[in-house]
């Protein structure tokens, strides 16, 4: 894809609701977003309330420093600590959390590039898109697609990168797209990210994306844009499956999207519970990310 690049970091304030607290870091302005604040839960030191009194006649077993067991005659109080609770394979004491590193938005440059012939042929008409999907389904069967959750931070608050098409300004999607027949999810997602987000090689070094965990699979029962995180009971042949992955961004890079698209960095608080504007897939992302540890770097 040849074309031009317009580098620069841009910020667009205002969300779908138009309020000043909803902000977007976009590819066409230069403001800063709203400052978020981390909250850290610090476990309290065990006190008297954490000690369970045990009847001496029950003779609970304790372990001394040498690892030998002895009876309750040595004492009648037994502290309940994590190490005293037996670990079950089904319920581990310490479930490891995956970590996502979020780098400051100022570390990234946003620009544009020329459109591919495929992008220029895409229709903005819902009817034409549906007819196209029906024709491809007859030839190839169920459509398979992938989407990437790409995160950065602005004032230590997580933002997600979304693509918005100028042909469909009210539609937001995760970077990604349709897979080729026989192509696996990871290879296809990497190809799509390089195609949609990477600048021409003669302009800047392409970003090094690191594909992470698959966090969701969505299904379309028909050729509309409706998607469910399950296959509805009345559907025997879903028309599309859509796999969503976390993707680790490098600490700095240059993005370049086709001129018919805009790359937006939207705060997670704006997409959460905002089904009307962002749809079910994007709206679910904040909840899906709640099991991840976010490591804010810089900013």
Image: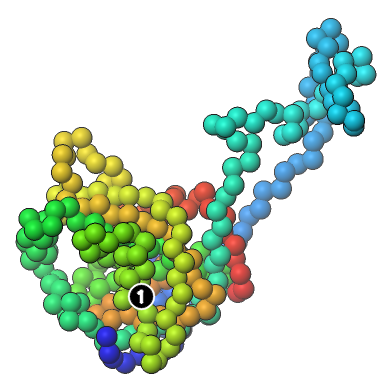
Residue nearer the viewer, 108 or 240: 240
Whether residue 54 sits left or right of residue 127 in the image: it is right
Residue 47 drawn at (x, y percent): 82, 33
The answer to whether any part of residue 34 appears in the image is: no
Residue 73 drawn at (x, y percent): 92, 14
Across the whole image, how many numbered discs are drawn on residues?
Answer: 1
Whether residue 285 sits left or right of residue 153 in the image: it is left
Whether residue 85 sits left or right of residue 128 in the image: it is right
Query: In what quadrant of the picture does the C terminus appear?
Result: bottom right
Residue underneath mark 1: 194
Crowd around label 1: few <14 · some 14–19 · many ≥20 (10 Å): some
Q: Residue at x 15, y 44 (%)?
A: 237
Give the quadrant of residue 260. Answer: bottom left
Residue nearer the viewer, 202 or 76: 202
The answer to whether any part of residue 81 appears in the image is: yes
* Figure check: 222 above or below 44: below
* Figure check: 213 above or below 103: above
Residue 22 drawn at (x, y percent): 43, 66
Whether residue 196 sits left or right of residue 294 in the image: it is left
Q: Residue at x 57, y 32 (%)?
A: 89
């Amino acid at each position: 894809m040849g074309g031009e690049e317009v580098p620069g970091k841009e910020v667009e304030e205002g969300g779908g609701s138009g309020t000043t607290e909803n902000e977007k870091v976009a590819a066409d302005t230069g403001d800063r977003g709203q400052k978020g604040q981390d909250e850290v839960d610090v476990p309290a030191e065990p006190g008297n309330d954490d000690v369970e009194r045990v009847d001496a006649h029950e003779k609970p077993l304790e372990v001394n420093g040498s690892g030998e067991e002895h009876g309750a005659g040595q004492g009648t109080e037994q502290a309940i600590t994590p190490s005293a609770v037996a670990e079950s394979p089904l319920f581990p004491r310490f479930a490891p959390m995956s970590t996502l590193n979020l780098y400051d938005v100022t570390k990234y440059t946003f620009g544009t590039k020329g459109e591919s012939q495929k992008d220029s042929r895409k229709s903005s008409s819902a009817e034409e898109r549906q007819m196209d999907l029906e024709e491809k389904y007859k030839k190839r069967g169920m459509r398979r697609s992938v989407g990437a959750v790409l995160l950065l931070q602005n004032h230590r608050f997580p933002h997600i990168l979304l693509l918005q098409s100028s042909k469909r300004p009210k539609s937001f999607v995760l970077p990604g797209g349709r897979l080729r027949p026989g192509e696996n999810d990871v290879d296809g997602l990497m190809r799509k990210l390089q195609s949609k987000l990477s600048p021409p090689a003669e302009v800047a070094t392409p970003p090094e994306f690191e594909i992470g965990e698959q966090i969701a699979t969505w299904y379309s029962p028909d050729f509309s844009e409706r998607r469910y995180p399950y296959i509805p009971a009345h559907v025997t042949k879903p028309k599309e499956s859509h796999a969503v992955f976390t993707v680790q961004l490098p600490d700095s890079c240059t993005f370049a999207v086709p001129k018919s698209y805009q790359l937006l960095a939207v705060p997670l608080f704006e997409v959460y519970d905002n089904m009307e504007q962002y749809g079910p897939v994007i709206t679910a992302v904040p909840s899906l990310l709640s099991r991840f540890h976010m490591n804010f770097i810089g900013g």
